Image (cartoon, helix red, strand yellow):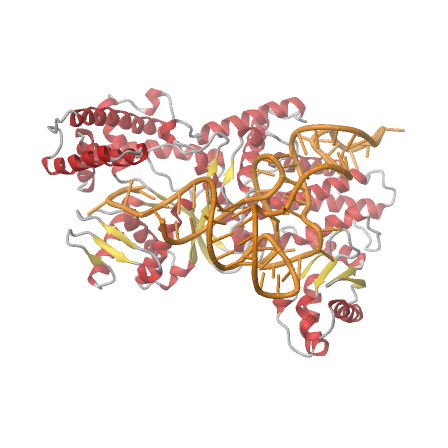
Amino acid sequence: MDIHSIISENLLTNATELFGTEIEAKQIQIQPTKKEFEGDLTLVVFPFVKLLRCAPEQAGEKIGAFLKENVDAISDFNVVKGFLNLSISKGLYVDQFKEILKNETYGIQPKSGKMYMVEYSSPNTNKPLHLGHLRNIFLGYSCAEILKANGHEVIKTQIINDRGIHICKSMLAWQKFGNGETPVDAGIKGDKFVGKYYVEFDKALKVETSAILEEIEAGNFNSIDPSQVEEIKKLQAARDQKDEEKDQKAIQSKITEIVKNQTALMKETKEMLQKWEQKEPEVYALWQKMNGWCYEGFNATYERMQVDFDTLYYESDTYLLGKDIVLKGLEDGIFYQKEDGSIWVDLTDEGLDHKLLLRSDGTAVYMTQDIGTAIERKKNYPELKGIIYTVGNEQDYHFQALFKILKKLGFDWWEECYHLSYGMVELPEGKMKSREGTVVDADDLMAETVDAAKEMTQERGHIEGMSDEEKSELYENIGLGGLKYYLLKVDPKRKMMFNPQESIDLNGNTGPFIQYTHARIQSLMRKAGTIGDFDSNISLEEVELALIKKLVEFPEVIQEAGSNYSPALIANYTYDLVKSFNSFYQSISIFNEENEDLKNFRLHLSKKTGQTVNIAMKLIGVNVPDQM
RNA sequence: GGCCUUGUAGCUCAACUGAAUAGAGCACUGGAUUUCGGCUCCAGCGGUUGCAGGUUUGAAUCCUGCCAGGGUCACCA
């Protein structure tokens, strides 16, 4: 048992004697003592002041004296204001370190018997992955690993948005302009290839739209469906009455929207979607072919990222399930139907709005398939204790609504669903906009960081005697490690600034800094060979004690990272640990130490630090090399 | 406009969910090493935690108002 719990236990069991009443565990706040004060652990005494009916200082003295009397490990104490600083005997830390040494998987929690599902990535199959996806994917993967480390069984999954009007856009463009070209012909990755046609479509649509816009400005409405003509004329009149440019623009974009839907191209796309829903062989085959290309490309990207999935869900399967459930819900009076046939849910009693569930033409929307997917998952894995959705925070409202809809449908497990919402990744030059070509492509970015890592390592690394294969694996680990660490060290909830320069920088709070320390430890280990035992009576230096204290924290950090779904806690802990090690390494000689016990202790301490760094970095998907 | 969210050192981020004198890195300045990997270590500089009130023994953290960003309010996904 660690000293932390010993103190808590002691206070809890002796509460009546000490305070004259029972106390709760949460009243006991123990924290590491600030370095400007004498002591190792600090108990905050304010919560007990009222119980003891005396000034904070006296209360501290009283509790301190009591603890010193009852807990062997406490060698001394002092009170500063309302803070009771306890000095722990150093021998106890040595003993604790010996305990840690015995555990090869130190930090990993025992099996909990609980199962969780983590969804991440979930791309559309019409364009390649970008920087935003990187944060999503690394975050989801890491959370899954952290939950595993907390003893849970984890299913990694994604929902693949493989259906819908946007997919038909690239299909149609390929049919029109592709001339049967394949990714192999074009010499580019499948997902990039499909994305190229999605852009083609957009271009063609723009051309056609602006032609029609010119026509209607000239008073020619031949291209417009007669039922829409009045609406457009009304909007035009309204626009021309506005003085502010901003207002004019707002109305103009409405007009553009209507016109877009009147283009031959959009009409064709919609027809294609209908044909797809009816599984018309030619369209269906095209859909399968192009999605296949996309998957090939995605899989290559996932492989390079070193992430994987246990099972996949496809929107093309689940949207039908969702439809059935919505219709059933309508029958049961949970949802309601408007005159035009569209189906809605009223969430105003939950503090939300009305939400569309099925269009008037009976086709599915985003929400429809999400309902279907959630229920299907719970059906496939009834023992699930929670579903975690890794999705950007622009969808906070959507998931709030989804969970409340599940509640209305009577699924009590709605409370076990969690939206792991993360902030946007911003660039120094502003926002990423696909239309303005300021998107940072995932593959390109990975390639760039790996290249930078290669250059850096060739310049100053220790890579003599490595085969070419080992070398390129090393560059990969450093480049990707840096990238992952950079994206994960920030609290997921917050938006973050992505500075390409800094992600490549290998100094400071970065992945490569941690990797380097690990490599140096391994160098020590190679030199040391087998390490002998050491006596508990050794006397510790301050830096050694600090390092042990840091190691002691690890299991708690894993638990906290698990309950907060925050890889950032792991990343920042590892950085602290490594800094603490470097401080130790710098000021104390290991091999020149003549005392065998001390030398062995220091080697064990280094080795355990290395192991812990390895375990921690694995949890955020970063490999730590033995040499770099 | 309604709802959600953010505002901490020049920059990028912390702060154990209410505790002591708000901490790191980058940048800048100055030091250390005949030593086990200098991608190291130590020190200095840098703060009215957006502003104004309130609750509390105690507030970056909770409440109210204001200011400034971002998101969202689609028969898009």
Q: Residue at x 46, y 57 (%)?
A: A115
Quadrant of res A382? bottom left
Quadrant of res A482? top right
Q: Nearer the viewer, residue A292 or B40?
A: B40
Please provide percent x and percent y for residue A186. 34, 20
Q: Is residue A418 above or below residue A505?
A: below
Q: Is residue A383 visible?
A: no
Please provide percent x and percent y for residue A468. 58, 24
Q: Is residue A152 visible?
A: yes
Q: How many marks?
A: 0
Left or right side of A402 for A45: right
Q: Residue at x 24, y 24 (%)?
A: A207
Q: Nearer the viewer, residue A230 or A434?
A: A230
Left or right side of A358 for A543: right
The quarter of the image holding the N terminus of chain A is bottom right
Quadrant of res A314? top left
The quarter of the image holding the C terminus of chain A is top right
Q: Nearer the viewer, residue A144 or A561?
A: A561
Q: Is residue B40 above or below residue A32?
A: above
Q: Is residue A193 above or below residue B22?
A: above
Please provide percent x and percent y for residue A429. 48, 29
State the residue lying farthest toward the right: A594
Q: Is residue B26 above or below residue A146?
A: above
Q: Residue at x 30, y 45 (%)?
A: A315
Please provide percent x and percent y for residue A274. 18, 40
